[in-house]
Image (tube, coloured by chain):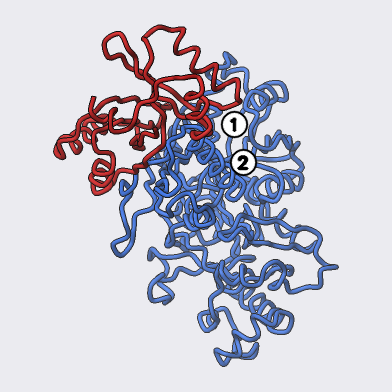
Amino acid sequence: MEIWNRPFECMDRNGIRHIQSERLRETVERVYFNVPYYRDKMQKAGLGPENIKSIDDIAKLPFTTKQDLRDNYPFGLFAVPMSEIVRVHASSGTTGKPTVVGYTRNDISTWSEVMARTLTSAGANRNDFIQVAYGYGLFTGGLGLHYGGEKIGASVIPISGGNTMRQIQLMHDFGSTVLACTPSYALFLAEAIQESGIKREDLKLRVGVFGAEPWTENMRREIEDKLRIKAIDIYGLSEVIGPGVASECLVQEGLHIAEDHFYPEIIDPETLQVLPSGSAGELVFTTITKEGLPLIRYRTRDLTRLTHETCKCGRTMVRMEKCLGRSDDMLIIRGVNLFPSQVESVLLEMSEIKPHYLLIVDRINNLDTLELKVEVDEAFFQDKISQLESLRHKLQTNLENSIGLGIKVTLVEPKVLERSEGKAKHVIDKRKY
Amino acid sequence: MITHQLSVFLENKSGRLTEVLEVLGEENIRITALSVADTSEFGILRLIVSDPDKARVSLKKKNFTVNLTDVISVMAPNEARYYAKILRILSDLDISVEYTYAFSVGAKSIIILRCSDTEKAIEALKRHEMELLKASDLYKI
């Protein structure tokens, strides 16, 4: 099995820790002197750069959360002048404000490097055709895979998401060997291929790199059976860099974290204490090479577990398990992050309805569906169907504009939806991963 | 000349109409007319009942979304041309009919109309000597 960057990916533990310590010191110094927000936080905790001597000191540093990014919207946490920023990406946020991330030229190069490792560990090389069916744009999926694919010298097909018939046609005509998309879209494609009449033997597809949403081992087996490929799990989040933070190798026993760039910790989400290797808890990342938007102990809210054992593939980089869930209420729908509070804020702006709602998430024909049940306010109710239909339509449009996802709105009778007794249940997720 | 029609918002699920009628039944309310307008997901039940205010209060207590809507009731022979004539009178004056339904009592039919401008519609129908029913008459049927 090929390894893209053997000196780093197979480095012994002492070597890794040495590099991590050095890079952490540089990062802490950089944010202390360049980002007032971090400096204030560190000073409040009685810390200066001199207190962080090695990676063992990392637990002294305060955490960073998504809320910190929002409070400093859009560029407040950037550690370089804007003239150094060559790219900006963003993901949807709860209050209509997205989470913004900025990259320097070196950051783009780091990202390409970790994506090159990812693709190589999935068995791809310069002879491959990589069909990138992740969305291109503010979302990091498309461009992340794209740069990694170019870095390893593969032929990249930047087809972006959607347009299933064209996906299948180009997959056939160009002879794509690697598919990159969300796992649910991979399943959807698998069925569309069956229906299209194109024979599997006429496709050259060999491996898929799937991520941006949680999926189970069952779903992996289904994808592997239906597409007759190896399905590789990749992990990333735009705040840290995008896809490429961690990825499986062909052994498929956990995702190797590029820990020479992103230092992982597992904490107890309640006590915030660091847990020993092997314990399940919330994943926290410190970026130790990033220039544009360095993050110190960023709480991902993803729940997983780490293992430091050397993998059968020879890589020594720490591995994380497939994510086990979330420590907050964030949903991932068709690869898009959605917090129920985003829906709530749209409802609160409309007087015609009551802010009691129920979101129902399901997976039908391998595609995530989203339905909102909401109560009509009696003061608004007259007896015209057209009036109710236009209300439903208006709400649907407002929601789709705000959350960037298709949603079905259903009007329901009052008091059908559970009232908050302590904590109301606002979400039913029927998906079986 | 104005009749208060009871309008009830209903989700399209089995048993809801039964529940409405059971609530009204417990209050000994009589139903003169009933009509349902529906889409694939919800419907609006429209009722002319003996005591609309009491019906409304009792349905509200059971958590139904209820409203009283002003409609007009016209009595005419149950022949199509009379129905047509009524609608023509209204359309000539650009009064739009949002919905209408009718039922027969002997050789007469009672036509219920929901118009964009109720006052103007009543005036016009009176001018054409149409027989408008008082709410109290209608509730007694």
Chain A tint in image:
blue
Q: Identify whether A106 is placed above or below B43.
A: below
Q: Say which residue appears at 51% left-offset and 32% top-offset.
A: A386
* Mark 2 secondary-structure assignment: loop
Chain B tint in image:
red
Q: Earlier in the sequence, mark 1 or mark 2?
A: 2
Q: Position of residue A294 (x, y in %)?
A: 67, 71
Instruction: Please give the residue where the numbered disc 1 appears in the rendered image.
Output: A206
**A312 left or right of B112 in image:** right
What amino acid type is highlighted by mark number 1? Arg
Chain at tag 2: A
* Mark 1 secondary-structure assignment: loop
**A14 left or right of A110 in image:** left
Q: Position of residue A272 (x, y in %)?
A: 43, 75
Measured in 3D between alpha carbons, the distance from the residue under mark 1 to the one under mark 2, in whole angstroms, is 9 Å
- Which residue appears farthest toward the right when viewing the image? A83
Closer to the camera, A270 or B47?
Answer: B47
- Which residue appears farthest toward the bottom when viewing the image? A46
* Res. A110 in view: yes
* Res. B10 in view: no
What amino acid type is highlighted by mark number 2? Gly
Q: Say which residue appears at 57% left-offset and 21% top-offset.
A: B91
Would you call the spot at circle 2 few (<14 residues within 10 Å), some (14-19), or many (20 or more)? many
Instruction: Please give the residue where the numbered disc 2 appears in the rendered image.
Output: A123
Check the picture and name the quadrant holding the N terminus of chain B: top left
Closer to the camera, B38 or A244?
Answer: B38
Q: Identify whether A159 is placed above or below A395.
A: above
